[in-house]
Amino acid sequence: MKNILSWVLVLFLTVSLLNNCLSHKVQKEISQKKSFIAKLRELYASGDTSKWPVPMLDEEAKPYFSEIGHLPEIQFPADNIYSPEKTVLGKTLFYDPRLSGSNQIACASCHDPELGWCDNRMVSFGHDRQLGTRNAMSILNSAYATSLFWDGRANSLEEQSQMPIQDQKEMSEHIDMAVGKIAKIKGYEILFERAFGDKTITKERVTKAIATFERSVKSPPSKFDRFIDGEANLFTDDEVMGLHLFRTKAQCINCHNSGYFSNNRFENIGTSLLSSEQEDLGRYLVTKKPEDVGKFRVPSLREIVRTGPWMHNGTFTSLTDIIQIYNKGNPELYKHRTTIYNGAELISHKSDMLRLLDLTDEEIMQLEVFLRTLSTKNQRISPPILPQ
């Protein structure tokens, strides 16, 4: 009996000792984690990017990399300089449905400021309720885009501004007819005179005014901007870790960098759905280069909460789902990687930068809460009174 009691006592003491050791180990790990996050908080909130941890970049991403940070000042082209009067005119035209063939659809129909300057649909409705084939991109911060549309077919906002007007599935009006209708509206004369010095209404002036307005639509400072400006306690621990993961293990920064959170390039992430009814060849339709099959513009992540659903075809409605797809290395959403187009076989080559990330559930959550810090509140803008 004494032997049994002795063994029980020894066992009890051994378990207690092990529990104490494990408890100390856990406490030590928690303490080390807290210290690590505190150090990261200090470094990132300093705003001094030279002190930030080195980002994890693929070799092919390095030539196009610039560090994340604030949006710079908007640059206006020399042949279309900024003026408040031109912006007022551009805003008025942006909201005017008389630019469309039906006199029912305006630029603002698909780019609503209360919906993140897009329409929150998978794909947009246009003329005669026709469905488009791509998700409407937000005009927010478009001043920083070096090309426009998912396939980059416009090289400037001036060029972009007339394309939806003439697209048969969007506003379905010839640009000259649209300008002719505007020219017949007496109330526009004073707006053009204030913006350009005289009452002449031309296609060039219409597109320049709309482009000036679009270029001026810029995000206010986000939670992220304030954090890196020194408001160190603004971020939770999870948001700090999310920022760190974004720049390191998750490797989002390969493509989503600079203050714009986009490298303004084109990548194939496996969403072209070749040989399906939803096939979209992307950038290839513009360049006709085989290597561009399935490539789409890298979108900005600023205002990401407000601009869903996401991807060129609005496939994803959840940020968590998007992160999980990237975590798995972006498996092809459709099995076929080839298609026949105009008699030629085309092959989709997914980016080599996409690979298994091995993020834990906690890290996925942390990455998502960081991404949410890049968004600001919805803007409420009163539509202008249209000239008569």
Image (cartoon, helix red, strand yellow):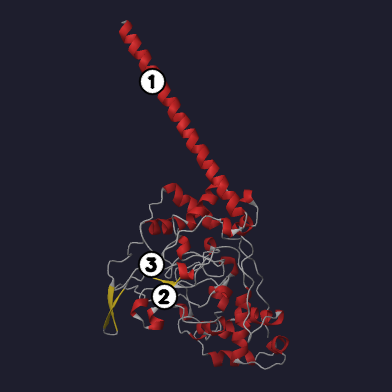
| Neighbours of disc 2 within 10 Å: few (<14), some (14-19), many (20+) | some
* Outermost residue toward the front in this view: 50
What residue is shown with label 3? 269
Task: Identify the mark nearer the N-term, 1 or 3.
Answer: 1
Q: In which quarter of the image is the N terminus?
A: top left
**Separation (CA) of disc 1 from disc 3:** 54 Å
Q: Is residue 30 left or right of 59 when viewed as pictured? A: right
- What amino acid type should be assigned to the residue bearing mark 1? Thr
Q: Are marks 1 and 2 in contact (CB under 8 Å)?
A: no
- The image position of residue 385, as x and y in percent, is 68, 78
Q: Which amino acid does label 2 sit on?
A: Thr
Circle 1 or circle 2, nearest the eye:
1
- Compare residues 147 and 384 and report the one nearer the observer: 147
Q: Residue at x 42, y 21 (%)?
A: 16
Q: Can I make out residue 235 in this image?
A: no
**Quarter-of-image position of residue 269:** bottom left
Disc assigned to residue 14:
1
The answer to whether residue 68 is seen in the rendering is yes
* Secondary structure under the numbered disc 3 in the rendered image: loop
Amino acid carrying mark 3 in the image: Ile
